Amino acid sequence: MAVSKNTHPPTPRANPKKKTRSKPDSEPDMEPDAPLLPIPPDSSVHFPEVIGKTVALLYYVNDAPGDWQSLEVCFTDGTYFSFELTPRVDARVFYEQIHSGGDEEVIRDYGIIPGNAPENGDG
């Protein structure tokens, strides 16, 4: 039985297109390996000081006898956000630095932010 040899070069195959995730028009352009984050509502308050920071510790304080509650977000560079929770579900927000020896310095005081605040925290 004779075997015929194919003398034509192989036909190149078209590379299949990679599947891509379509994104809403409102989603900002992000690095390809960046995590997907929720899009905050227009009524949200933004804290640009924390962009790119690494969280070291997150804890909740409930001082029952004094009715004082706080959510603390501590970063690896020694700064932290303190969300003091009030009975009206408002938050008093500070951006602070802890110095050696335990002294605290308020870098920015956002004041009390009502639960329905339209501002974005930049002011």
Image (cartoon, rainbow, N blue to C red):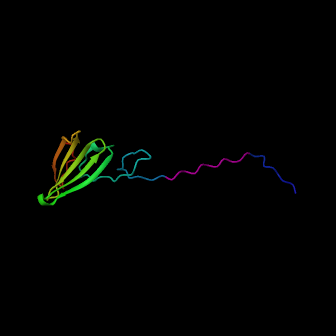
Left or right of 2? Residue 10 is: left
Viewer-nearest residue: 120 or 70: 70
Residue drawn at x 43%, y 53% as measured from the top left: 22
Viewer-nearest residue: 24 or 106: 106
Tell me where the magenta segment starts and ends, as one range. Answer: 9-19
Viewer-nearest residue: 59 or 87: 59
Quarter of the picture containing the N terminus is: bottom right
The residue lying furthest to the left in this view is: 66
Q: Position of residue 30 (x, y in %)?
A: 40, 45
Counting labels gives 0
Q: Position of residue 7 (x, y in %)?
A: 78, 46
The residue lying furthest to the front in this view is: 101
Q: Is the magenta region chiefly helix, strand or loop?
A: loop
Whether residue 8 appears in magenta in the rendering, the answer is no
Quarter of the rendering containing residue 54: top left
Q: Up-down: is 8 above or below 85?
A: above
Q: Position of residue 3 (x, y in %)?
A: 84, 53
Residue drawn at x 45%, y 53% as measured from the top left: 21
Q: Position of residue 59 (x, y in %)?
A: 26, 54
Residue drawn at x 58%, y 51% as measured from the top left: 16
Viewer-nearest residue: 34 or 103: 103
Left or right of 97? Residue 16 is: right
Left or right of 16? Residue 72 is: left
